[in-house]
Image: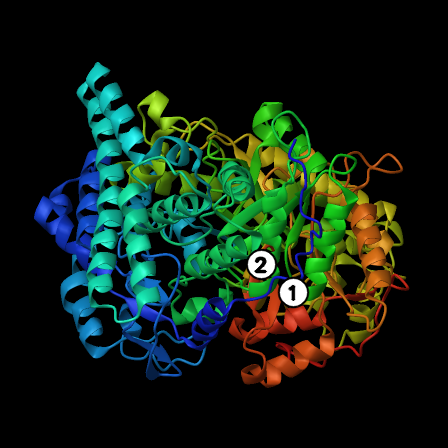
Amino acid sequence: MPTITLPDVSLKEHTLTPRVAALKEAYFRAVPEVCTERALLVTRGSLAQGLFAKPRLTSLDKATLYRHVLEQRRPVVRHGAAVAAGMVPFTLEDRSLFAGSTTSKFKGVPLYPEFLALALWPELETITKRQANPYYLTEDQARLLNEEVFPHWLDCNINELGRRRAKASHQAATGQPGDAPEVKLLESLVFFITSKPNCISHTLPDFSRALKLGLGGLVAEAEQKGAQAKDGETRDFYAALAQAMAGIIAYSRNLAAEARRLAALAKDAAEKRELLELAEIHERVPAQPAASFREGLTTVWMCWTAIHLENPNVGLSLGRLDQVLYPLYAQDIAAGRLDVGRAIELLCCLWLKIGDHVPTVPSAGEQLFGGSGSNQAITIGGVDAEGNDAVNDLTYVMLRATELMRLRDPNLNARYYPGVSSRDFLRRLCDVNLTTGATPALHNDRAVIAALTAKGETIEQARDYGVIGCVEPGSNGRSYGHTGAILMNLISALELTLWNGEHRHTGLGRLISKRTGDPTTFKSFGQLKQAFAEQAAWLVDQATSLNNTFGRVHQEVYPTPILSALFEGPMDKGRDLIFGGAVINSSGAAIIGFADVIDSLAAVERLVFDERSLSLADLLAALKADFVGHEALQARLRNPDKTPKYGNEDPKADAIARWLAELLDDLYAQKENYRGGRYRVGYWTMTNHAGFGRLSQASPNGRRAHENFTSGITPVSGVTPYLTKALHSVASLPSRLLSNGVALNLKYTPEQGDRQRMLDNFMASVEAYFEASSGRGVGGMEIQFNVTTRDTFVEAAKHPENYPELLVRVSGYTAYFKDLNPQMQQEIIERTEYNLSTGHAVEFPAPPTSPTGPT
């Protein structure tokens, strides 16, 4: 167990160095630029290798392609080129302590034509001018995409291949022409999203072997195993691993050559020394084992750029960096080669590098689900494989770097084990949240480890979990979970129940799912629950079936040799991750609209079946009218004194919450994925609770048409007046049912004056949620905060130019408030805000509404 040697864990004496301050300023000034480099190199390489003509691509095919791209891509050492800032180019002298980049731009938008980059095709001429999150794109780059890249991928992108595969299966099974029903559900957007047409990210690799052996060591191991392989397919797989690692080594050495070239041109002696040092580092690593902290960071960074070459930048996560890098850090500190200030500066530079790119989102995506970053999670703290406290000096150094930078990426997540981790550590985590207003998210080790072992992981595997994407736990470098495979709108299951298999978004009178009975004829709430369970089961079946279809397309054309080389399992099994090469092979579903469904069912149970003060027919009429002319009923449905609400320790609401969680865990656990693993369920929503809400009609909890759903596992805004009760209700859900992670979003009022008193109350709220008191099992799983007033958010929505760096917790990740679409901004403004001194919700006037939703 590491000993904390820092005299002051806050490290307040360390501030941004001039280098980092200048880089950060430039970072926030820069407008993202579309980078065509990867798209061009992948397209040209695929043509040269004849890959477009092959019906099936092997790991060796992809590794050969990626090695070519890594060898040919521009080795960026200093970004001295023009960078778009407010559409006005300026000269930037990038003095980062790290070379290389995810794209060829200072802040780039990488394109993956194999996935959904073609969605940008119709807006190549307008993307620079669009209102929400514009991307800078030159006319020459648009022409290259239009003429040389996109046409080749029309018929062979993952989305189109999956659609054709599903269509063929549907026609073979039914003899009926047309698209498969599950594809139509996906395209309607209101039922579920399967993300494999966009990525198979949402996982975290293992950097420990790259650090200890060097990629040259991994190449040698792959070649040795390949020589011993008994069949050609396995030999080719090992050859693919060797090719992929050789490509990363070649890219790093190209960076070394570029650094030496620039050093020869440098006039400033300090600049020349820095460039020569960069060259020496990249000549050694990642080929050789990392011998210093900076070399360790460089190895991670080189592997990270390569992983993003292979896979779209959505929810790829870096894992427990304070654990894998600590031996190098401690060694350098002890030898006097490194001090804390330099370590913080190195991390600040790396944090900016990690955020050097943004996801590719078309205009339609911005309107519905925009504002999300890449969600590159880093995990700190927690316990080790033996259950001992693993917090070390580097944990605090990473916390300080995060506190100073206040960036949306990387997404910092902290693990805390009640009774094992130090309360001083918890206090520091809360302190950083007060400073940044939004980070880090806090995870209860006791609950998470219990959830993972309930799914069959060993205690050692579970203790070594890292956080993926938003909040999803996965055993570090051995769990290939694609935790964001399915995003399911639970309100649609309720909609199908209330309208007997029909859905108002697609039009009443058209059967979508199955007939489960006219609910106006139900005599008991049990009948309604049974109908809901059948509709939910149907939706789960459709979503998992389509996910598996897209997964098999990935197996045919998109193996992942780079990621496979940096994972535990493939080297031993001789099998790519996409074919089940990992040690753990789960898939993840996230549930959207959880609290809205709980409160809706609780209202129906109370008013329709218990009190019998409202007929279901009258309720449906009010829903059809969007409560226009039924305002008194709507007020009654929203009132926690009139109808049970999740988040108030109400027995009926909490019982429904547990029933739903049990139902969904059981339904998904029955499904096997295309890699032989099982599905896991979580409750986090990114920005999808705003997007799905915008597409959905009024619901029985009093929510009007097109209003936002509630985020994550959080209770509905405005119905939980007491913080302690809200925490206890959420914590009462068994962690074994939440194995794909949860996001509990809370908003606290910043208090002026006595910061230590607020810290005491902040810690008490976390401990109340994490502690397993009153028989509530292992306590709440995850909690995250916005420590910003409602008034500040309102002002930032009106004048975003005055708040360029305002950081906000959405649902599992951090974002810049200005980047969120108006619907998402409104949801954050309307979240329940608690005063920690009283534990009571702050009262605000109800937002004005219109027949079509919030104004």
Count of marks, rendered view: 2
User: With respect to residue 471, does 548 lie above or below?
Assistant: above
**Residue 311: x percent and y percent?**
34, 48
Which of the 4 image quarters holds residue 458? top right
The quarter in which the C terminus is drawn is: bottom right
Task: Identify the mark nearer the N-term, 2 or 1.
Answer: 2
Q: Which mark is residue 446?
A: none
Name the residue nearer the viewer: 526 or 694.
694
Kind of residue indicated by mark 2: Thr
User: With respect to residue 89, does 220 lie above or below?
Assistant: above
**Residue 783: x percent and y percent?**
70, 51
Q: Is residue 851 left or right of residue 511?
A: right
Q: Are marks 2 and 1 in contact (CB under 8 Å)?
A: yes
Q: Is residue 785 visible?
A: no
Q: Is disc 1 placed on a helix, strand or loop?
A: helix
Q: Is residue 653 left or right of residue 69?
A: right
**Residue 72: x percent and y percent?**
17, 53
Residue ID for mark 1? 436
Kind of residue indicated by mark 1: Thr
Residue ID for mark 2? 402
The quarter in which the N terminus is drawn is: top right
User: With respect to residue 325, does 104 lie above or below?
Assistant: below
Mark 1 surroundings: few (<14), some (14-19) or many (≥20) residues within 10 A:
many
**Residue 735: x percent and y percent?**
70, 37
Q: Is residue 528 visible?
A: yes
Q: Residue at x 44, y 70 (%)?
A: 23
Q: Is residue 405 left or right of residue 636?
A: left
Estimate the spatial distance between the alpha carbons at disc 2 and disc 1, rounded to whole Å: 9 Å
Which of the 4 image quarters holds residue 232? top left
Mark 2 surroundings: few (<14), some (14-19) or many (≥20) residues within 10 A:
many
